[in-house]
Every structure is written in structure tokens, then in C-alpha cells.
Amino acid sequence: MALVPSLASTLDRRIADALSAALPEAGSADPLLRRSDRADFQANGMLALAKKLKGNPRELAGKVVENLPADELIADVEVSGPGFLNVTLTDGAILRTLAARYADDRLGVPFKEHPGTTVIDWAQPNVAKEMHVGHLRNSVIGNSVVRILEFVGEKVVSRHHIGDWGTQFGMLIQYLIEHPHELDHKGEVSGEEAMSNLNRLYKASRALFDSDDAFKARARRRVVDLQAGDEETLALWQRFVDESKIYFYSVFDKLDVEIRDEDIVGESGYNDMLAETCRLLEESGVAVRSEGALCVFFDDVKGPEGKPVPLIVQKSDGGFGYAATDLSAVRDRVFNLKADTLLYVVDSRQSLHFKMVFETARRAGWLADDTKAVMLGFGTVLGKDGKPFKTREGETVRLVDLLDEAIDRATAVVRDKAEKVGLSEREIVENGRHVGIGAVKYADLSTSVSRDYKFDLDQMVSLNGDTSVYLQYAYARIRSILRRAGEVAPAAHPELPLAPAERALGLHLDQFGEVVTEVAASYEPHKLAGYLYQLASLLTTFYDQCQVLSDENAREVVENRLFLVDLTARTLRQGMALLGIHTPERL
Ligand code: ARG
């Protein structure tokens, strides 16, 4: 459907045109338009421009005003201060633009001008290991970025680079060979059971490995068999992967994050490329042998005593590690998946690794100048004490426990109000899930990706403040008003004057498209969260100052206000969906 230009962009163009008419030698100068408290918008561009051309900014601003066309967009424009322009728009222009957004399924949000292909690496847990809070971040951030990019028309391919390879599998597989029924299932297994099976096997095999030298030797030989692609060994390895997937899917399901099986391409998926990756690097001279290992060196990467720290692509014993896999993945993503952008949602503690991988790939010519490689490094989840989040016993917190607790807490909050709203038990349970998971996701996404944040459930499920449940209530409240409106339907009435709270809400609604465009370009979901929170706050002010369903209102006023709140609801719903958060109809 149609793209709706925002009022800001229309006004920007008008002023820019008036500016070049007033001062042809300025070329196409930027009027530097901002939202303002004094009027609706302020343009500051005349200041710098007049200075540059040795003119008088107030005079220039006055000429710009003369050159602005008289039409229905601008209600008032004045020159103020040293040479700003304060612009107030007409209520009619605001309502007409909002009506155009309202008529569009996409709320007037534009598609990207030049969509490309982004391969995004996110939600990458490790086989036979419990998922922890770090995996919360790469799942939640990745999921939102995928949704935002797809919404603006980018082709997105997900890659879940799970840790499914490595020497620990020798030990596990050998143990399973010697205890063949340990992973047999009688019926369907839950995620919890699958994980506890894997934990049990891990502990038992580890204990044997540490205490029994003969077993240790057999386990080591098993690693060699696995790497050589021995069929029996691979089949057993597959059983660990499958068992882990049962667990992963149960957690992703709880987290309300959709993962497709064909997008799970773990470390093992690049096995066949590793030797060639190393050969290409060595032949091109990008990597060199150093003490038997194949290494890539960097001028700016040095260790403690100024000794260069290399990226090791092949160890001296011939084994390939994490780097060789990631370099092979770059080749696959660029040459087979045709990516022009590579995105990695990973813990910022892996920054150095990715910096070296990207630089190596550039030197090797696998990343062309116009291919973007971006690491979205996320910060650490902290406990209330400001230290990395741990259980009381000092262990890493299991992701499932954390999610269950969030759901419990949220369900209590929902239940508290349930009677008043008339929710059934089924709705309480469902809303409890959406509120609890929404709270966890929102807390994560409303902080900028790179920053650490404190995991504080009390704050996350609070009804007041910058929380998802505050936004969810704002949405549900509008839905309730619309139900109560009965046969009166929302309709825009551009002939009506707007109250200040209506104008403020309307002007903010109009920015949705620009915010989404910006967030899609900068991969910053927290800016979308901030926008939505402000939207809900403006709605609260609007309720304080304007009655919607009041007998004292003329019918047109009721229809117009219903239109404003309905557009607000749709914007909230769409925005929350882009963050991966549900907005229940009744709460
Ligand atoms: N499995 C890793 C972890 O749990 C993350 C993998 C990140 N992706 C990559 N291409 N290296 O920390």
C-alpha cells in the first residue's frame, strides 16, 4: 500500500525549497528541522547557512517565510531568536495525514528503498548444554531485528550457529556406546526431561573421563573417529543433537520465538569447508604458519607484552577451531546465500574474535567493499547487585527458571485485575504468559544492545513506568473503549480543532514510519521501545485531558477521538509485534 510521507518530511521539503528560492547560492541546504516545545517544529538551518555566507540569519529566515507557499499545511510560522523558524501546523493537516496512515495496513511505513539480503546469526545455544541468560539476549534481540528488517522489505536469512562440535563429544559418544540405552525414550520427551538426560550423561561421562585413563583414551580416539566422519560415531553424535533440539525448541517456544529447523546450521555444518578455507588463506598469504599453527596477524591486536595475538585458523595438531568455522560460514553466507549484509548477534566479549574474522575475510577477498559485516555485540545481564547474574549458589541462572518465574509473577499481576475485566481462567493463563515473556523481552530490548542491564523482575512487571505491561495495558484499554463505543465507529474529522493533548499524540503517531526506518538501518530496537513508551505516555495525558465516550461530546468529536485512539492501538500493536511482544485484547 501507499507510503505516507510524514508531516516532518513534507515540511522539511517545503522549507528547503523556500530556502533555495530565498538564497539560490545555498544550493540544497538542510533546514535542520526538529520537533519543538515552543511550536510543533523548529528549523535551525538558517543560522549556520547565514554565517557561512556572511549574511544575517534573521533576514534570511524572514525571506524563507516569504517564500513558503500559503497552503493548508502551515497554520503559523514566525522568526524567533537569532534566526530560528517556529512552525505550527494546521489541525487539518495532522488529521489528514493520520487518516492516510489509518487507511494503510502498514500504517504508512515505507519499505526500504534498496532492499538487500541480510544473513543474521542469532539464537545460538550449545548442544548438550543448558541455555542461560546470554542466550536470552541473542534470542530476543535477534528475533526483533529479524522482524524489523523483514517488515521494511529486507530479505532475511537466519542462521543459528549452534555449538554442536568439539572434543567434548568424544567423551559423550564413547559413554553412550558403553551405556547404549541411556538416551532411549519410551514416549514423547519434554524439553526438561531432554535436558536432564543430557546433564546426567554429561556428568557421568565427565566423571569417568576424569577417573578412568582407559576411558579417557577411548574418548580421545572417538574424537578422531567423529572428525573422520565415521558413520556409527556420527549417528550417535546426531542423537545428542536431536535430544538437545527437543530442549531448545521447548525453551524457544516458552520464549515465544520462532526458530525454523532449516535455519539451524551449527558449527558442524561447515566441516566440509574447513580444510579449503585454510588452504585458501595460506595460499593467498593471508595466513602464515607460526610454530606449526596457521595464523593471521594484525597490527593493532597485541597481547600483554606487546606480542601480537594471532587469529588461529588451524592448530599445530591439525585441528580446526571456532575461527576456521566462522570464516567458512562467512564464505557460505556471502557466496551461497548471497548476503550483502552479515549480522551477528553475539556477546560483546566475542568482539575481538569477530573483528579478526571480518578483517581476515576482507583480506581474503570474501568480504567485498560493499558487503557489510556487523557484530551486534550485547552487554551482560546483571543481578540486582550489579554483578553478572548468578544464582545464590554462584551458578549461572537457567533460562527456563527465569522465564517460569517471570510468567508466575505476571500471572499474579493479571489475576489481580482479572475479575474486574471478566477474564476466564484460560485467558488469565494466556495473558500471564504474554505479560511475563513480554516483560522479559521488553526489559532487554529497551536498553541499548551494547549495554549491560539489571535483571529485576519486580521492575519488569510493574504497571507503571517503562515496562511492556504498561504498554500492553494502554493497548487493552483502547480496545475496551472501542468495544464500549458500540455502533459509533472511529472516523477522522479534519475540520475539527484539536486539543493540545490530541495534537501531541497525533504528531507522535505520525513519526512511526521514520522511527521504524531508522531502527531498521541502525539495528537499535531500543529506539522503537522508547518511541512506544512515549506513545503510551502521550495517550495517558490524552485520557487525562480529553474524554472519549462522553455524552457531552458531539458525535464527530467522539468519532475523531475514537479514530485517534484506534490508530494509537494499531501503532502500539505493530510496534510491539516488531519487538516480538504480544498485545492481549483484554487485560
Ligand atoms: N554458540 C556460541 C555461544 O553460545 C555463540 C555463537 C555465535 N555465532 C558465531 N557465528 N560464532 O556463545
Image (spheres, grey):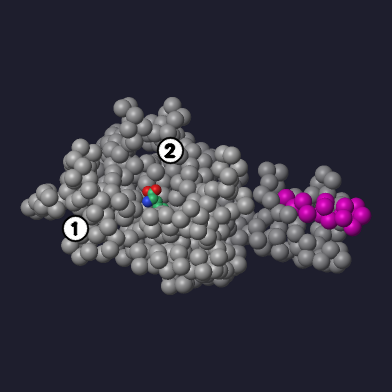
Please give left or right for residue 391 compared with residue 23 in the image.
Answer: left
- Local crowd at mark 1 within 10 Å, few (<14), some, or many (≥20)? some
- Badge count: 2
Please give left or right for residue 427 compared with residue 299 in the image.
Answer: left
Q: Residue at position x 51%, y 48% from top?
A: 351
- Residue 270, relative to residue 40: is it above or below? below
Q: Residue 468's spot in the image, x, y percent?
A: 42, 43
Q: Quadrant of residue 438?
A: top left
Disc 1 marks a residue whose amino acid type is: Leu
Q: Is residue 54 magenta?
A: yes
Q: Is residue 290 magenta?
A: no
Q: Give the range drawn in magenta.
A: 42-56
* The C terminus lies in quadrant: top left
569 or 493, nearer to the observer: 569
> What residue occupies the far left of the structure in this picture?
186
Pointer 2 residue: 381
Q: Residue 236 carries which label?
A: 1
